[in-house]
Structures are given as structure tokens and as C-alpha cells.
Amino acid sequence: MDDNGMNERELRELLKRGVPPARVELRRDLWPRMRRRIEQRQVRVPWTDWALAALAAGSLLLLPHLAAVLLYQL
């Protein structure tokens, strides 16, 4: 067998010896808790986002030629 095959086999054996198999048992299933949190989650918009939206709308009303600049930023 060539040198590459021998190195690959040795590497596999070294990894098997060096990294023990993971034997972790969870105390409980976490998925139901995660689903409850996702379902209860409310979308909250910070006041700064509302202020930026108002500023953008106001600037479009006062300076309509800046619409291209605003669209470029989106």
C-alpha cells in the first residue's frame, strides 16, 4: 500500500484513541421549551427605528429629489 493510505489509516487510529466517543444524555427535551419561547416572542421595534422612519418620511416630503439616495441605502 502506498504511503498516503498508511498515513490515513494511522491518522484514523490516532483520532479514535485521542477523541473518546461522546456519551451525553440530556436530562430533558429542550425542543418544547424552545417552541414555547418562539411562540411567546413579541416583535418589539425600538424607538430609534421609528425615529429613523419618521426622519426618512419627512425628508422625502420636504426633499423629494433625495428619494434616489434613500432607495440606494436600502
Image (tube, helix red, strand yellow):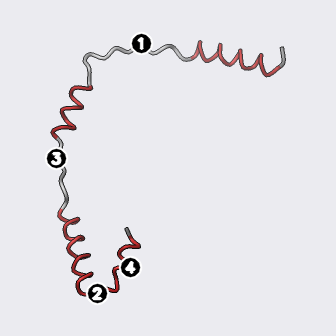
Query: Which quadrant would residue 14 be assigned to in this image?
Result: top right
Label placed on residue 23: 1
**Helix, strand or loop status at disc 2:** loop
Label 2–label 4 contact, CB within 8 A:
no
For the point 71% across and 15% down, the residue is 9
Give the residue type that dot 2 points to.
Answer: Leu
Q: Distance of mark 2 from mark 3, alpha carbons? A: 35 Å
Mark closer to the chain start, 4 or 3: 3
Residue 74 position by quadrant: bottom left
Residue at 65 percent of width and 16 percent of height: 12
Q: Mark 3 vs mark 1: which is more N-terminal? A: 1
Q: Amino acid at mark 4?
A: Ala
62 vs 65, left or right, is left
Q: Nearer the viewer, mark 4 or mark 3?
A: 4
Q: Out of 7 and 72, give the one closest to the viewer.
A: 72
- Please rate how many residues cluster around mark 2, counting C-alpha atoms within 10 Å: few if below 14, some from 14 to 19, many from 20: few
| Above/below status of 70 relative to 46 | below
Which label is found at residue 63? 2
Q: Circle 4 is placed at which residue position?
A: 68
- What is the quadrant of residue 65 in the picture? bottom left
* Local crowd size for mark 1, using a 10 Å CA cut-off: few (<14), some (14–19), many (≥20): few
In 3D space, how far apart are the residues under numbered discs 2 and 4 (Cα atoms)?
Answer: 11 Å
The residue depicted at 28 percent of the width and 87 percent of the height is 63
Amino acid tagged 1: Arg
Residue nearest the observer in this picture, 59 or 68: 68
Q: Which mark is first along the chain, 4 or 1?
A: 1
Indicate the secondary structure of the residue bearing disc 4: helix
Per the image, label 3 sits on a secondary structure element best described as loop
Name the residue carrying label 3.
42
Marks 4/3: CA–CA distance: 33 Å
Q: Residues within 10 Å of mark 3 (few under 14, many from 20)?
A: few
